Image (cartoon, grey):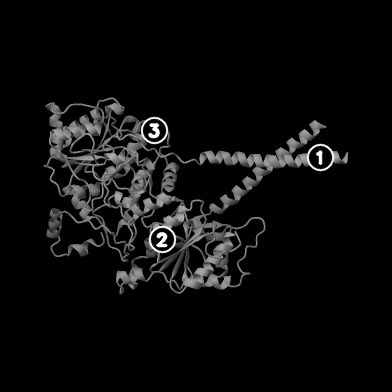
Amino acid sequence: MASKSWLNILIFLCGSAIGFLLCSQLFSILLGEQGDTQPNVLHNDPHARHSDDNGENHLEGQMNFNADSNQHKDENTDIAENLYQKVKILCWVMTGPQNLEKKAKHVKATWAQRCNKVLFMSSEENKDFPAVGLKTKEGRDQLYWKTIKAFQYVHEHYLEDADWFLKADDDTYVILDNLRWLLAKYDPKEPIYFGRRFKPYVKQGYMSGGAGYVLSKEALKRFVDAFKTDKCTHTSSIEDLALGKCMEIINVQAGDSRDTTGKETFHPFVPEHHLIKGYLPRTFWYWNYNYYPPIEGPGCCSDLAVSFHYVDSTTMYELEYLVYHLRPYGYLYRYQPTLPENILKEISQTNKNEDTKVKLGNP
Amino acid sequence: MVSASGTSFFKGMLLGSISWVLITMFGQIHIRHGGQTPDHEHHHLRPPNRNDFLNTSEMTPMELSKGIRVFCIIFGESEDESYWVVLKETWTKHCDKTELYDTKNDNLFNIESNDKWVQMRTTYKYVFEKYGNNYNWFFLALPTTFAVIENLKYLLFTRNASQPFYLGHTVISGDLEYVTVEGGIVLSRESMKRLNRLLHNSENCTDQSVIWRLSEDKQLAICLKYAGVHAENAEDYEGRDVFNTKPIAQLIEEALSNNPQQVVASCLSDMAITFNGLTPQKMEVMMYGLYRLRAFGHYFNDTLVFLPPVGSEND
């Protein structure tokens, strides 16, 4: 009788131990599943487009970094404002009805505000957003149609409102101030366009669609004209390549967008993919596509980068924060870019009695 | 007989499960209570204002900047060994001196203990004895933390290191306000002095608790309190935390998911000092985003000037 009750107690204790362990294991397995980070999407085709959302959570709200301007009371933006007036850029963002709230919204909340004029191009009109309706269908095969129609729309309605015309995707982040610095030394009456230059298929190279590209006013005129005269037609749905081929036909030059140290400014991926050595495998198409010798590590990217691509909503705000807000106080940056000649002359004329360097402080 | 032992087994399992649930819940309440306390109990520390600048205007920016010397201690363990290399190659280059202490592989002291508090106090004692005279500020961070030393120096440059300062991201737990190690811990030379006076007697500042071991950052706070040093939460001019315990992406996501219908004012400070929870790759990206990537045409009139470190590419 005694041994039976001892046995019962033993079994009871075993049960409680097992119950305890089972619960904690179950819980940690559940936690483990939630803790999985999302896989980074490495697109294995240069012309791969952002298909449907791969199930990632999209950000519901929006963040405004400029809600209080007190943080920037030590900041002198005279040069940036001067360039805003001198180098007028119209931005059009390739988007679609499904992506207005998911992606385009965050573009609108961040970098788009720095364009002299911004238009969101969709297949159908949306008066509230607002988005322009191009009257095409949606889908990967419509990209070149959308591009052609977007440029035609811009040419018809806004030609005199800007000197340069930028195309970007709704997952491209663009630093307009740096684009203005790049373009300031060129004349918009020249037939030229800039972007991340790729070498295959087109002798002078063509510009990556996702990294964004910018046409001079003359380039835009020639492009739109070419479709009127059938010099260029809708040859394929690979937007950036087809546009690049057309540019070559109409004698618009593919420009060199690298900075004065030879570092690239337009980027087809987010900074991490370019900065971390070995992130992009050697077999990846990118290494064979780049027009100039491709570099990974710190030499990949200019301090005055113009664009990044495959930027998700969180990263839009992160880039906005890193570029325009967070800074190391008092830091003397290694790369000291110079102002273009014409701008320098103008500034020294308007500030006749002040030494330009003293006024500017620490760039 | 079999069914009797069967039921007692299941009764046992039930008891085991219930007791696990109770213990976890109790643990959660304990943690949650520690976090939710009204702000007005905090001590705050803000960056210098215009009046503070006036007192220092006789010195050149270079002299002013060289006057603040920060000693960095990286303290903790990590499964990813590459952290230690990356830390040396990234932000710690901007410290005046750095000591990296891997608590798992104990390269410095060969203490037998795995007790983080014992390791921490030994580290502080060692650093003060060896370097206490040459540096005026001592900053301790985890291997997963990224710190902007220039902004730390800006926060501190008008403060007197002969005063007992103890700063970071503070949390109130019961009646103890302490600086969380995840955000980084800043001690002035005076605080280090007082701490070390206490630590010289190994009986002081030992963990008295039996069941719930207090974390090392709480232990430090208790010990410092005994020495008359109190924690202060460091903030910017708008009251935003400058020591962050999470990475930028997470802070953004949290802010936006809490207010899906609104446009949220940014919770991130222009003069943020730390972010925690970064991978080694994210640290490399921070170096570029912080020390290189910027918008052309924006200039600043800063009172301090910091030169880039010699012989590096990523800043």
Asked if marks 3 and 1 fall on the same chain, the answer is yes
User: Is A319 on the left-hand or right-hand side of B18?
Assistant: left
Closer to the camera in the image, A204 or A110: A204
Q: Position of residue A288 (x, y in %)?
A: 28, 39
Marks 2,1: beta carbons within 8 A: no
User: Is A45 on the left-hand or right-hand side of B97?
Assistant: left
| Element class at badge 1 | helix
Residue type, label 3: Asp
Residue matched to label 3: A53
State the CA–CA distance, disc 3 to disc 1: 59 Å
Residue matched to label 1: A7
Residue type, label 1: Leu
The residue shown at (22%, 47%) is A179
Closer to the camera in the image, B60 or B36: B60
Work out whether A264 lies above or below A354.
above
In terms of image quadrants, where is residue B122? bottom right
Query: How many residues crowd around disc 3 within 10 Å: few (fewer than 14), some, or many (20 or more)?
Result: few
Asked if marks 3 and 2 fall on the same chain, the answer is no
Q: Disc 3 or disc 1, which is closer to the eye? A: 1
Q: Is residue B241 visible?
A: no
